[in-house]
């Protein structure tokens, strides 16, 4: 199946933009959930992994953000809205793309969204480089030091990214991120699906130290892999091979 673009109307203000490719006859889909403020390819991670999986699965990628080309920016919605977007894409995959089995691969903040949605019908879920405690304070500190960044929890925040682009953040996002309890969400999720939690051992973004809550949960498959937050450079090939093994293993 060639790369096909799709649009899903979530509400009067949000249209989800996505794409799919791969083996539609398999009736099995991999739905990718990317992290904070980036686009559906997750800095190329999801494209590379999708290329290795599309012979056996229908690969589905979509944007949690609104892309503002003229402003060189992405606009981030509250986590609760993003959870509704993920729910809509999974439903679309079943109703319009003929998928019977949904698998989710989430990265970074996409893990929080997946945990918040807590889908009942996912076969496997893989959480990559996820926080295990609320990242609210760390995010504010991490981004506020960048020249030009404006954090406004009551309005629109404008965050400068390392590549020179911008991420605009809606006010409701901060309320969601402040109150979230990732470990609790993952425990609930693990009770009803085959859940893998993959920690990046040299993560430069997620600096949480105490992973005992997920390590000790008998329903969570906990792994540690070498690599930074994006499993970049020399760590990428090992990460790709591990992901394929996890998905294709029984």
Image: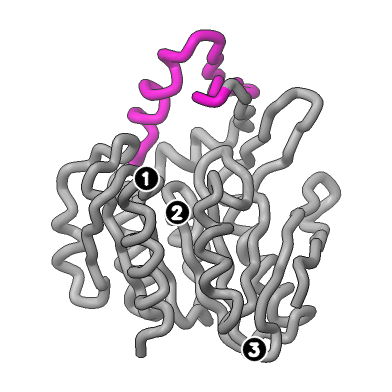
Q: Is residue 12 left or right of residue 82?
A: right
Residue that mark 3 sits on: 27
The tag earlier along the polypeptide, 1 or 2, is 2
Q: Is residue 81 left or right of residue 53?
A: right
Real-space CA distance between mark 1 and mark 2, rounded to the nearest whole angstrom: 17 Å
Expressed as whole percent of the image width and height from the top left, the position of residue 78 reads: 59, 42
Real-space CA distance between mark 3 and mark 1, rounded to the nearest whole angstrom: 33 Å
At x 56% / y 83%, what residue is drawn? 56
SS category of the residue bearing label 1: helix
Farthest right residue?
12
State whether residue 74 is above or below residue 142.
Answer: below
Residue that mark 1 sits on: 233
Q: Which of 62 and 227 is in front in this view?
A: 227
Residue that mark 2 sits on: 107
Expressed as whole percent of the image width and height from the top left, the position of residue 245 reads: 36, 77
Q: In this view, does 152 lie to the left or right of 205?
A: right
Q: In the rendered image, which quarter is residue 222 located in?
A: bottom left
Q: How crowded is mark 2: few (under 14 residues within 10 Å), some or many (20 or more)?
A: many
Q: In which quarter of the image is the N terminus?
A: bottom right
């Amino acid at each position: 199946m060639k790369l096909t673009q799709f649009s899903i109307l979530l509400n009067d203000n949000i249209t989800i933009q996505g794409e799919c490719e791969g083996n539609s006859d398999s009736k099995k889909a991999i739905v990718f959930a990317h992290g904070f403020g980036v686009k559906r390819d997750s800095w190329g991670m999801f494209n590379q992994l999708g290329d290795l999986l599309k012979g056996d699965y229908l690969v589905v990628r979509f944007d949690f953000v609104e892309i503002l080309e003229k402003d060189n920016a992405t606009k981030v919605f509250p986590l609760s809205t993003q959870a509704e977007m993920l729910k809509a894409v999974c439903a679309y995959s079943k109703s319009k793309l003929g998928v019977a089995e949904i698998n989710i691969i989430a990265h970074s903040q996409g893990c929080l969204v997946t945990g918040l949605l807590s889908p009942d019908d996912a076969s496997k879920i893989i959480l990559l480089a996820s926080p295990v405690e609320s990242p609210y304070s760390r995010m504010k500190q991490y981004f506020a030091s960048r020249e030009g960044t404006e954090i406004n929890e009551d309005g629109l925040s404008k965050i400068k990214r390392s590549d020179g682009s911008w991420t605009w953040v809606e006010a409701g996002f901060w309320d969601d991120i402040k109150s979230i309890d990732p470990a609790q969400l993952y425990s609930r999720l693990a009770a009803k699906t085959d859940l893998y939690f993959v920690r990046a051992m040299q993560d430069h973004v997620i600096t949480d130290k105490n992973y005992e809550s997920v390590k000790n949960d008998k329903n969570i498959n906990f792994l540690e892999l070498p690599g930074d937050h994006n499993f970049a450079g020399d760590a990428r090939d090992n990460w790709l091979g591990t992901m394929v093994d996890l998905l294709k293993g029984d």
